[in-house]
Image (tube, rainbow, N blue to C red):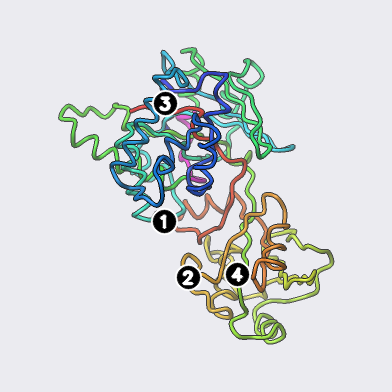
Amino acid sequence: MIVRPFRGLRPRKDMVEKVAVRPYDVVSTEEAREEARKNPYCFYRVTRPEIDFEGDVDTKSKEVLKKAKENLEWLIKEGVMIQDEKPCFYVYRLQRGDHVQVGLLATFSVDEYVNDKIKKHELTRKEKEDERAMHVYIVRAHTGPVYLMYKSDESVNRTFESVVNEKEPEYDFTDGTGVRHTLYLVCEDEKINEIVEAFKKIDAFYIADGHHRAAAAARAREWFKNENPSHMGEEEYNYFLAVVFPHDRLKVYEYNRVVKDLNGMSKEEFLEKVREKFDVSVASEKPYRPKRVHEFGVYFGNGEWYVMKPKDGTFDPNHPVEKLDVSILQNNLLAPILGIENPRTDPRIDFVPAVHGLGDLVKFVDEGGFKIGFTLYPTPVEAIMEVSDAKLIMPPKSTWFDPKLKSGIVVHLI
């Protein structure tokens, strides 16, 4: 597989904490706007440029997207962000509590994405893809990295993970959520070549998070090609920004579910129907976080917890998607019993990542107007790769990867 160094645009050391922000798609416009009110250097002014306009605006409009370009140019003009003089790799270390993961921040081949060597497990929505593609095209930059993984290989891992012990970091700070972000530069030709050669033995990359960003890079590439009569295939627009990690270093959290009603049933009627497909018992601990795959916690409020386990024959154990816990719950309970056929659009269901424990789910049910909550075991990383290899699609809200990558630490200019 191809990993390619590039001349990153980066904040000055003393400004990185002011510039770096969470991914654009995990914050609301108002959250981003509030941050920018306090800190005019925050990178939301590039990734969420609508915050510089009053009221509701069309985030896909050229006026809004040109503002993103203006804001990026302003950061450069002010000397807040500076482009490296030569192509480099960047080693990105993330830490939350005891969990540590180290990835390679580089540019990756759009051709390998188009040819399914960079594998997907999620459908993209055209309107989101359109907006991000126009953002890339107008801003002339990839401003937020895609989150990739590969089947771990220790000889490959060592080529960049060793940098953490060999170099002083360029950046080292802890964000407001408790995640420590550390970045190292690799600009030496010999080390760059070692990393490039090592990755040639990797057969595929897998998108963990950022499907819309990857799809947008491919869409924008076609627009850049069409306006370039001397297109050669090595222009910057043929590569997109990402961080790639060995799969066994990643931390995936469960994406739990809460539902607003029992579809007209009493709790007893609901449990009677559930017992047709699941073995149900009172939970031995509260709150209940499943200990293994194919086990679910059920919360009715007021401290009342149950455990569900699917009965034999409930699902196909050999099918990459049907054997996922999110599929088992959807196909055997949410759809047939609660009438939630499309969890993407049904207003009766919401999704609660468990990165900070089960307190949020409990609060949703006890105080937030929801009737029932379901806790799941985290989807194994290997299952994500199995689905991708089979060219299948994961159900919505199957995974929550954490820690999240920051935007604005390194930008890829086109």
N-term mark: 4 or 2 = 4
| Quarter holding residue 215 | top left
Q: Is residue 180 above or below residue 131?
A: above
Q: Nearer the viewer, mark 3 or mark 1?
A: 1
**Spot occupied by residue 90 in the image (x, y as percentages of width and height):** 52, 24
Q: Secondary structure at mark 4?
A: helix
Residue at mark 2 to residue at mark 3: CA–CA distance: 40 Å
Which residue is label 3 attached to?
Answer: 4
In the drawing, does residue 296 fall left or right of residue 104?
A: right
Which residue is label 2 attached to?
Answer: 342
Callout 3–callout 1 Cβ contact below 8 Å: no
Which residue is label 1 attached to?
Answer: 123
Residue at mark 3 to residue at mark 1: CA–CA distance: 27 Å
Q: Crowdedness of circle 3 by 10 Å Cα count: few (<14), some, many (20+)?
A: many
In the drawing, does residue 266 fall left or right of residue 105?
A: right
Callout 2–callout 3 Cβ contact below 8 Å: no
The three-letter code of the residue at mark 2 reads Asn
Q: Secondary structure at mark 3?
A: loop
N-term mark: 1 or 2 = 1
